[in-house]
Image (cartoon, grey):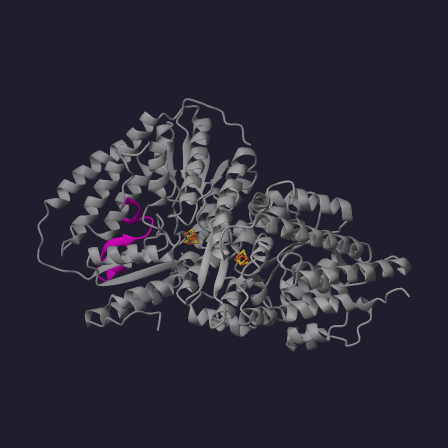
């Protein structure tokens, strides 16, 4: 176990996955930093030295960022990882092993509706709390925790409200811009975000429609990392479509449901994070598909672009079920198996362009998988 | 009369290139070995057929029961049909079926694809399957998809145990596992019969003891049975290919053969090597390893597979305990180091072979960590990426294995 020296400078707790109850980190006086950079092929190659090729490039990039000495990553005092997929779990172990970064691996159940799983999650959240207390030397009181839950809920709510403005025929904010707000949520102090989000919401609400209705797209699937702008730029800047909602963990999805403010704070966090809009690693898969369908209907999307990173089992193996579900409701899906290399951009452009053409012609059967 | 050396007296020579095209099921059938090992091969070969027959005869048959839960499955008089064994003797067409039907990406590990393809082919047969949430992502997602094909799947929601978890937190995992296994019991057929479970645990421990004895005898007499044969033996150490009584008899027979052989054995020139990680079915690789004068002095996975259930604990607790410790996956690479170090010391092994399947993220970081650790201590190691289901070894693996064996000799 690494010796944890308590100093006055706030400790920086890094995490990768949205199943990490960050309220516990802020309540302990530490700064939570979500580590979700991606998109750079050289950093990927660097990470591959330790992961070998069978990893998704986000996981490789995460390892590579430590190896390359990215200042944000190397400023982290400890990583907390509620283990989701194998690759991130192993990436965290590699980071700990090869770069001496202290980490705490926490268990995340999959069968979230079982009583036993919920009770177990609660125990793991307690382990997490005790560990952050050890890191900072500060006790996390229920009172402090409740305050943090309220603050973070408000920030989530602002993001959800901003996102809902995209339900208009002519959304006042692009998908690319919404991702910038999400980044702010993960990189900046919540207090600062509250002010900004509110201001931004008021500003956007006041914008008038010009009567245009762009093609409305939902992006679904695996992570769209900070720095992985290729697809979003292609869809919005080059092809003129609008991403009106994101069914992935760096878009709207983590902000959809609030944490209960009525339960005791630890119960609220443990239940609330388990009940967040599900990622594909949770069971049952049908629940995830239900949520995706609900989002697509709610935002009246014309089509879905489903992105899975190569080597990501969660999102690639469940792709066919996803496509079948949306064929059932008549929403076409284009599936993209992506990585961070530049080489396939031309091909991507052609595929997305052809898909949009079909949709504009009203082809509901434009989906690329699931016969 | 002392037993002969079947390992060195092949009635039907199998050459590398011939083997490349040979159906490996046929290879098992024609492979001469000890009489006891031939019986193991027979058990392995008709395992699935016997599961089907049991199903036709009205016995409850479930996919599962491979490692931690076989006593529980047996205690319900159910037949455990281990789904990994289903994939093990599968052909390439199962892999392509899984890729096409489920649109599983090519990068996905072949173990999952072979299993999925086989399950799909058999979807008109029994459909109950036990999954463990601590299995890897590909399996967990694939089983969710398989539910759409009408499979009735019970997931024991036990998460991956992080490295170094002990004490209260470890017990918390065991508590969780116990509740989950009780749920599995309900799914298998109602409340758990503790006495019956205790009996099954005792029987499994007894078989473990015999397999351990065989491995010890085999290590001190490595010329008697080869690597592949040994692998098929301990593959069955927990599920017994669905026939515990017969499997135990075979163990007795093999112990007798080995003891007889030992009486007149001459010292071996073979080089001891540790096999860590998975057990691929590229039979040619094991044959080559034997031909190059190696023998496996320790299989890391056996340490976990042959871990006895604690008979002092209430039976379900004992089961939960072993489930949490798990096989090679949970606990990460670090948990494996003491076991490997002990094996190196005890057996004088000259190197370690890490065998993983293409596309397996579980093993790849573990192997990197372990290779680093051991190379710093001057222990040579080799990482091989293979495929799970039967097939010829890749040229690359053959070349690398040859070079490695040459080096350590
Ligand atoms: S993209 Fe897939 S494999 Fe990669 S971190 Fe996300 S869930 Fe894991
Ligand atoms: S080899 Fe790896 S990826 Fe394949 S089934 Fe096993 S743990 Fe999963």
Residue A24 shown in magenta: no
The spot of residue A312 in percent (x, y) is 43, 57
Q: Quadrant of residue A244?
A: bottom left
Q: Nearer the viewer, residue B68 or B112?
A: B68
View extreme (top): residue: A8
Magenta-colored span? A235-255
Instruction: Name the quadrant of the N terminus of chain A.
Output: top right
Residue B219 to residue A70: above or below: below
- Who's the residue at 70% across and 51% down the image? B380
Q: Quadrant of residue B357?
A: bottom right
Image side of residue B81 versus residue B291, left or right: left
* Res B107 seen here: no
Q: Nearer the viewer, residue A110 or A52?
A: A110
Instruction: Name the quadrant of the C terminus of chain A.
Output: bottom left
* Res B74 seen here: yes
Image side of residue A205 versus residue A33, left or right: left
The spot of residue A276 in percent (x, y) is 32, 46
Q: Nearer the viewer, residue B236 or B204?
A: B204
Image side of residue A234 versus residue B221, left or right: left
The spot of residue B394 in percent (x, y) is 62, 68
Image side of residue B108 versus residue B3, left or right: left
Residue A246 shown in magenta: yes
Q: How many marks?
A: 0
The spot of residue A255 in percent (x, y) is 28, 44
Residue A41 to residue B105: above or below: above
Q: Nearer the viewer, residue B256 or A356?
A: B256
């Amino acid at each position: 176990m690494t010796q944890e020296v308590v100093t006055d400078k706030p400790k920086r707790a890094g995490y990768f996955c949205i199943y990490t109850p960050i309220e516990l980190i802020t309540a302990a006086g530490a700064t939570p930093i979500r580590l979700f950079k991606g998109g750079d092929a050289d950093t990927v190659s660097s990470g591959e030295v330790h992961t070998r090729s069978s990893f998704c490039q986000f996981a490789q990039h995460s390892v590579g960022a430590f190896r390359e000495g990215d200042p944000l990553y190397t400023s982290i005092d400890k990583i907390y990882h509620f283990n989701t997929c194998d690759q991130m779990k192993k990436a965290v172990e590699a980071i700990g092993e090869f770069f001496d970064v202290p980490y705490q691996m926490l268990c995340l159940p999959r069968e979230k509706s079982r009583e036993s799983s919920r009770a177990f999650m609660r125990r793991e959240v307690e382990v997490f709390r005790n560990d952050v207390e050890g890191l900072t030397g500060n006790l996390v009181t229920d009172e402090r925790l409740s305050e943090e839950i309220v603050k973070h809920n408000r920030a989530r709510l602002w993001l959800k409200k901003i996102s809902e403005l995209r339900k208009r025929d002519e959304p006042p904010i692009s998908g690319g811009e919404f991702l910038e707000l999400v980044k702010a949520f993960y990189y900046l102090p919540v207090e600062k975000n509250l002010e900004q989000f509110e201001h931004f919401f008021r500003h956007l609400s006041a914008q008038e429609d010009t009567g245009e209705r762009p093609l409305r797209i939902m992006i679904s699937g695996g992570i769209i990392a900070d720095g992985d702008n290729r697809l979003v730029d292609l869809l919005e800047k080059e092809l003129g479509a609008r991403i009106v909602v994101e069914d992935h963990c760096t878009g709207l999805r983590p902000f959809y449901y609030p944490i209960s403010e009525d339960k005791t704070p630890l119960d609220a966090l443990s239940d609330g994070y388990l009940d967040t809009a599900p990622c594909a690693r949770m069971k049952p898969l049908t629940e995830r598909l239900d949520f995706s369908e609900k989002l697509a209907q709610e935002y009246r999307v014309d089509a879905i672009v489903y992105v899975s990173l190569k080597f990501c089992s969660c999102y690639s193996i469940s792709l066919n079920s996803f496509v079948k579900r949306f064929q059932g409701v008549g929403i076409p899906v284009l599936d993209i198996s992506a990585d961070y290399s530049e080489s396939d951009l031309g091909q991507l452009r052609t595929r997305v362009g052809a898909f949009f053409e079909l949709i504009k012609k009203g082809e509901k059967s434009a989906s690329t998988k699931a016969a | 009369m002392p037993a002969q050396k079947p390992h060195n007296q092949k009635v039907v020579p199998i050459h590398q290139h011939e083997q490349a095209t040979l159906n490996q099921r046929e290879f098992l059938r024609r492979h001469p070995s000890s009489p006891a090992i031939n019986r193991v091969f027979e058990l392995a070969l008709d395992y699935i057929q016997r599961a089907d027959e049991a199903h036709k005869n009205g016995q409850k048959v479930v996919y599962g029961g491979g490692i931690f839960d076989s006593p529980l499955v047996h205690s319900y008089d159910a037949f455990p049909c281990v789904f990994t064994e289903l994939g093990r003797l599968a052909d390439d067409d199962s892999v392509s079926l899984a890729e096409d039907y489920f649109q599983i990406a090519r990068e996905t590990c072949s173990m999952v694809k072979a299993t999925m393809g086989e399950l799909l082919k058999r979807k008109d047969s029994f459909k109950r399957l036990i999954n463990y949430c601590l299995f890897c992502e590909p399996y967990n997602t694939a089983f969710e998809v398989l539910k759409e094909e009408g499979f009735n799947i019970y997931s024991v929601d036990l998460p991956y145990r992080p490295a170094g978890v002990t004490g209260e937190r470890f017990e918390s995992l065991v508590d969780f596992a116990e509740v989950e296994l009780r749920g599995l019991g309900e799914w298998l057929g109602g409340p758990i019969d503790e006495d019956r479970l205790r009996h099954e645990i005792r029987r499994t421990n007894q078989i473990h003891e015999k397999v351990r004895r065989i491995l010890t005898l085999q290590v001190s007499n490595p010329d008697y049975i080869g690597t592949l044969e040994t692998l098929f033996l301990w593959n069955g150490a927990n599920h017994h290919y669905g026939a515990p009584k017969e499997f135990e008899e075979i163990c007795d027979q093999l112990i007798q053969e080995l003891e007889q052989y030992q009486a007149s054995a001459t010292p071996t020139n073979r080089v001891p090597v540790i096999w860590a990680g998975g057990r691929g079915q590229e039979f040619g690789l094991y044959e080559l390893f034997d031909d190059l004068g190696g023998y496996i002095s320790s299989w890391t996975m056996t340490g976990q597979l042959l871990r006895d259930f604690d008979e002092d604990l209430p039976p379900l607790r004992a089961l939960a305990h072993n489930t949490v410790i798990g096989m090679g996956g949970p606990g990460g690479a670090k948990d494996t180091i003491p076991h490997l170090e002990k094996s190196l010391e005890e057996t004088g092994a000259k190197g370690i072979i890490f065998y993983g399947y293409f596309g397996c993220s579980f093993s790849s970081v573990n192997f990197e960590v372990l290779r680093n650790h051991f190379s710093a201590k001057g222990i040579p190691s080799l990482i091989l990426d293979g495929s799970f289901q039967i097939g010829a070894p890749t040229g690359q693996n053959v070349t690398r294995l040859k070079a490695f064996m040459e080096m350590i000799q």
